[in-house]
Image (cartoon, helix red, strand yellow):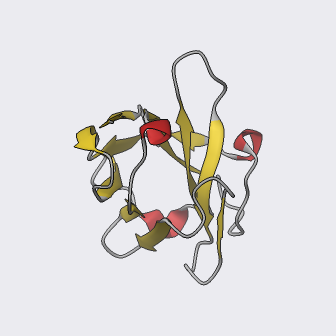
Amino acid sequence: VQLQASGGGLVETGDPLKLSCTPSDDSFSFNSLGGMGWFRQAPGKEREFVASISWSGATTIYADSVKGRVTISRNNAANTLVLRMNNVKPEDSANYYCASRRSTRTVSARAVEYTYWGQGTLVTVSS
């Protein structure tokens, strides 16, 4: 399964941001996937966890660095995973990746527990 993230670009400090993730193959359903998440990687830094959501959407977890500014949601029927961020900061600049666990439906902050990854969408926040 290939995932594709979109919505990145150049934004100004304080702006809102919406990132989306969909399957590259329209015939594939998010109902078949497990818990999903967003990670990000800034140049010269390690990839870090941002947010994760369970298969049902009932459970979400967030990194401390974004808690209170970020909301993750998913619509399995529409095959869409969304990350909304308010009040973006220059330190939010990074490549953002969506990912999915193969079948385990719970949330996770550990990248090694995700099987499917998108190609990344670059977010640059100007100060």
Going by the image, does 74 lie left or right of 110? Answer: left
**x, y percentage for residue 13?**
32, 47
- Judge whether residue 89 can be spotted in this image: yes
**x, y percentage for residue 106?**
72, 69
**x, y percentage for residue 76?**
42, 73
- At a point 55% along the width and 61% down the height, the residue shown is 33
Pick whichever, 51 or 77, lies toward us: 51
Going by the image, does 107 lie left or right of 22? Answer: right
- Judge whether residue 34 can be spotted in this image: no
Above or below for 18 versus 126: below
Quarter of the figure that contains the C terminus: top left
- At a point 70% along the width and 41% down the height, the residue shown is 111
Going by the image, does 116 lie left or right of 103? Answer: left
**x, y percentage for residue 5?**
35, 44
- Picture quadrant where residue 87 is located: bottom left
Pick whichever, 88 or 22, lies toward us: 88
Above or below for 63 versus 79: above
- At a point 44% along the width and 71% down the height, the residue shown is 74
Above or below for 116 versus 109: above
Above or below for 125 versus 69: above
Residue furthest toward the top? 44
- At a point 52% along the width and 27% down the height, the residue shown is 42
Residue furthest toward the front? 127
Total marks placed: 0
Pick whichever, 104 or 16, lies toward us: 16
Going by the image, does 41 lie left or right of 93? Answer: right
